[in-house]
Image (cartoon, rainbow, N blue to C red):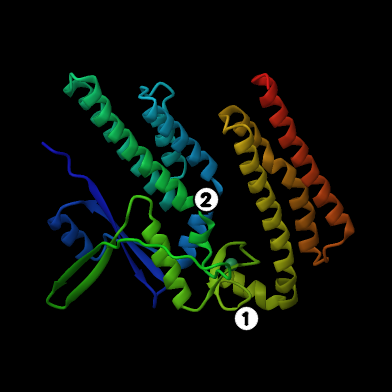
Amino acid sequence: MTEISTITLYQIDRNRKSVAFVNCPDTDEDIQKSCTASDTAKIYSFDEILNQLEIFRDNFFEFENLLDRMTENISKGREDNDNVLTAAENFRTAHSDNLFAVYYSEILLKYYNQGRQKINTLLGTFRNATTRNHYTQQQKDSLTEILSEIRNAVNDEWNFDFNTKKDTHLIRRTSNLIIIRGENLNQVWNIADDSLLNFYLDFSYAVKRLDVSVLRCPYCNKHYLGTESSSCCEKSECKSACAKSKRHAYENQTYVHERKAFKGYIRTKRNFLKNAVHNDSEIMQKFNDKADSFYAPVDELLIEYMDGNKPIDKTFTDLYQSQEKKLLAFMHQLIADWKEKHNI
Ligand SMILES: [Zn+2]
């Protein structure tokens, strides 16, 4: 019996600023039943999507590590000795409230399992070594291609830069639609691709057409969609806090900017280190374990300033710069450690 795979569909509702997701077995009957039932779809507001994406992408180094290990096991034809399957399942469990973490870990588990099974079958099918190598290589290539598509989709800032003012570039994607039409019924659903790139592009387009920008709420610190004149998100507690002090809200943008800038610095150094040490997992783990601790004193002072509605001053910038320097020194130390380990 062949296993029926599942399919993920989405529908973007610009008027309600929400996205409906349906995940069901990939048969016409199941799709029709799931899409037309009133309670099957999971509905997320645009704001929730933005926040879940941000959380997922901030934890992406963990996910990327899974991608790396899977790619390596597949390309080298290794068994799952390093328990990457367990790691992927743990990742899914740890982030089970995050739509993207769940979606991608399931995709990874599916392809990784299927791919290894297919390769094993092929190895047992052909006697001739050249033919065997040819077919197993094809299988390895198609798997590593899927993994790298996911990596690129999540890594490319352009996909998440909804209000881009940067250079223009063109992207060609095939879009798959499912249409369900009947009496009083006319639905169009998009089929999510493995990397979710189509979804990111559709979502970005919907955001753009609403003529809103991605802003960060200075009260709950979460992303929301608003216009230039909005000062906070739609949550009632944020609205009342905002009403109390418009000025406070304005100042807060500065603090949020500082916070984002430091996080950005950490991200840049992580990428630099990753290249320098050829993504050595032990070194990267050391960096990931400690990187946020350099930001902690900056955050502490920021909160103090924020509470006292105090403008950014030299004391703050001095501390900020010294923490940046410490992080940089730490990164160089890790590179030196790595070189020593490899006698370079
Ligand atoms: Zn808010």
- Quadrant of the drawing holding the C terminus: top right
Q: Which residue is mark 2?
A: 57
Q: Residue at x 83, y 46 (%)?
A: 322
Which residue lies most toward the right here? 314
Which residue lies most toward the front here? 130
Residue 234 shows in the view: no
Instruction: Choose between 35 and 283: the one closer to the eye.
Output: 283
Residue type, mark 1 in image: Ser
The number of callouts visible is: 2
**In the image, 3: left or right of 72?**
left
Q: Earlier in the sequence, mark 1 or mark 2?
A: 2
Q: Residue at x 60, y 33 (%)?
A: 284
Mark drawn on residue 60: none
| Looking at the image, residue 233 lies above or below residue 325 | below
Q: Secondary structure at mark 1?
A: loop
Cα distance between the residues tagged 1 and 2: 28 Å
Q: Which residue is mark 1?
A: 229
Instruction: Choose between 314 and 306: the one closer to the eye.
Output: 314
Q: Residue at x 52, y 39 (%)?
A: 62
Q: Residue at x 49, y 56 (%)?
A: 53
- Contact? badges 1 and 2 (CB < 8 Å): no
Indicate the position of residue 151 as horizontal and vertical percent values: 45, 46
**In the image, 67: left or right of 9?**
right
Indicate the position of residue 275 as horizontal and vertical percent values: 60, 38
Q: Is mark 1 within 8 Å of ligand 1?
A: no
Which residue lies most toward the bottom here? 229
Judged from the image, the quadrant occupied by ligand 1 is bottom right
Task: Decide: few, some or many residues near mark 2? Use Cα within 10 Å; few <14, some 14-19, many ≥20.
Answer: some
| Looking at the image, residue 276 lies above or below residue 24 | above
Q: Secondary structure at mark 2?
A: helix
